[in-house]
């Protein structure tokens, strides 16, 4: 079994790599949608033979019905990070809502202000029927792929929203969903600035505020404040040491919360980390039915941060891309065992070099 990362080991190569990785707009080889002059939605609609419907209800109206689809594959693409999981959706949660993430459900945390269209696509060659949620720029935030165990009638009902229809559900099945929908509509009608101003004082925020600061603007303002937080435990660390820490956690089979953050959408999972493999900067984390793929070659900064959780002050690994957006958070949420929390905090303290 490999040892925990040495906090005193200096990884010059990782820091040099980060220094030479150009940010968006300075890289002539950047494949950002803005540089391509097209977004995912426009590209799909212009594809020859495309068969699908943009839903009138939009993301805000469609998302509450995701649990009705039953067993699906949920995929969130966040720059250098992709998370996919198999299962049924929880009712999505809006800004300020509780942190929900477990091994039995696909959990989404949404910010309607940063989301746009919803699209259903008909089955195509080797691609099942799909429900896609797009961000405000027209790029895919989350995609739901149907499986053999999905509820096709529910999918067809959701597809009717494209022609002004309303999805139909059994009586009482949407109690939690409607509550979440009402919460999101209140957020949309009365938007407030995300609680990012306290990003440099982690002891002053809780984990809900941590995730919502990332949902607010992708974590850009939060990242700008992190260097000023060294006195309260914030620490920038080389990506190679983050890779080593995740590999070590996988060897221990440590329970962990992983959150992949696309614009306006965070997909979360809490379960034992079953495996981790890295090759030339590309890493795959396995956790039950979930796979999280991280391309550290496109990561510019990794930080250890702190926020108040169920066990008090809790450490997190935050991974930022060349846009200055947070793509991944690895942390502990909920009532984990004392042994798990102690092991995690030891790992975070070692990584931070304290």
Image (spheres, rainbow, N blue to C red):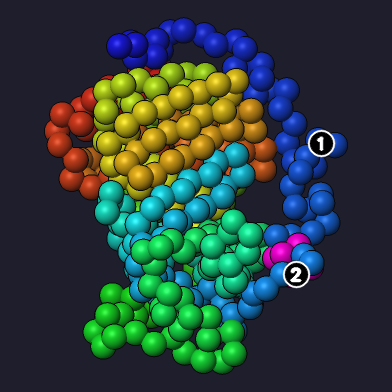
For the point 30% across and 45% down, the residue is 270
Mark 2 element type: loop
For the point 26% across and 88% down, the residue is 171
Q: Are marks 1 and 2 in contact (CB under 8 Å)?
A: no
State the mark number for residue 49: 2
Alpha-carbon span between mark 1 and mark 2: 30 Å
Q: Residue furthest left?
A: 338
Main SS of residues in magenta: helix
Q: Residue furthest bottom?
A: 164
Range covered by the magenta-colored residues = 41-46
Measured as percent of width and height from the top left, residue 309 is found at 27, 45
| Horizontal side of residue 220 vs 317, given as left or right | right
Measured as percent of width and height from the top left, residue 251 is found at 31, 21
Q: Residue furthest top?
A: 9
For the question of whether residue 99 can be seen, the reply is no
**Up-down: is 8 above or below 160?**
above
- In the rendered structure, which disc, 1 or 2, sits on the residue that comes first in sequence? 1
For the point 69% across and 22% down, the residue is 19
Which residue is denoted by mark 1 in the rendering?
29
**Up-down: is 338 above or below 182?**
above
> Was residue 274 drawn as part of the magenta stretch in this picture?
no
**Up-down: is 232 above or below 67?**
above
Q: Quadrant of residue 295?
A: top right
For the point 32% across and 33% down, the residue is 273
Q: Residues within 10 Å of mark 2 (few under 14, many from 20)?
A: few
Tell which tag, 1 or 2, sits nearer the viewer: 2
Query: Which image quarter holds the C terminus?
Result: top left
| Horizontal side of residue 114 vs 149, given as left or right | right
């Amino acid at each position: 079994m490999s040892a925990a990362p040495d906090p005193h080991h200096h990884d010059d190569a990782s820091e040099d790599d980060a220094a030479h990785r150009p940010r968006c707009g300075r890289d002539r080889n950047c494949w950002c949608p803005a540089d391509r002059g097209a977004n995912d939605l426009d590209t799909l609609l212009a594809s020859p033979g495309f068969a699908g419907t943009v839903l009138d209800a939009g993301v805000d109206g469609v998302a509450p019905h995701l649990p009705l689809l039953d067993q699906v594959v949920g995929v969130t693409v966040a720059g250098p990070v992709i998370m996919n999981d198999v299962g049924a959706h929880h009712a999505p949660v809006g800004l300020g809502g509780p942190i929900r993430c477990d091994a039995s459900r696909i959990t989404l945390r949404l910010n309607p202000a940063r989301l746009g269209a919803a699209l259903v696509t008909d089955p195509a060659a080797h691609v099942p029927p799909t429900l896609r949620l797009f961000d405000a720029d027209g790029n895919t935030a989350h995609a739901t792929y149907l499986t053999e165990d999905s509820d096709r009638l529910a999918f067809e009902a959701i597809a009717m929203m494209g022609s002004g229809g309303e999805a139909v559900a059994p009586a009482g099945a949407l109690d939690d969903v409607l509550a979440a929908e009402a919460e999101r509509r209140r957020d949309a009608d009365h938007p407030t600035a995300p609680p990012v101003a306290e990003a440099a004082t982690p002891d002053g925020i809780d984990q809900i505020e941590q995730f919502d600061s990332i949902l607010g603007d992708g974590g850009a303002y939060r990242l700008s404040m992190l260097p000023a937080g060294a006195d309260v435990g914030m620490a920038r660390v080389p990506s190679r040491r983050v890779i080593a820490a995740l590999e070590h956690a996988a060897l221990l089979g440590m329970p962990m919360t992983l959150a992949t953050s696309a614009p306006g959408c965070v997909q979360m999972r809490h379960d034992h980390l079953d495996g981790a493999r890295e090759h030339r900067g590309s890493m795959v984390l396995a956790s039950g039915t979930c796979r999280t793929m991280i391309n550290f070659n496109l990561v510019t900064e990794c930080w250890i941060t702190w926020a108040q959780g169920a066990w008090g002050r809790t450490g997190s690994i935050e991974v930022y891309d060349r846009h200055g957006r947070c793509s991944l958070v690895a942390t502990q949420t909920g009532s984990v065992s004392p042994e798990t929390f102690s092991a995690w905090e030891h790992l975070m303290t070692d990584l931070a070099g304290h």
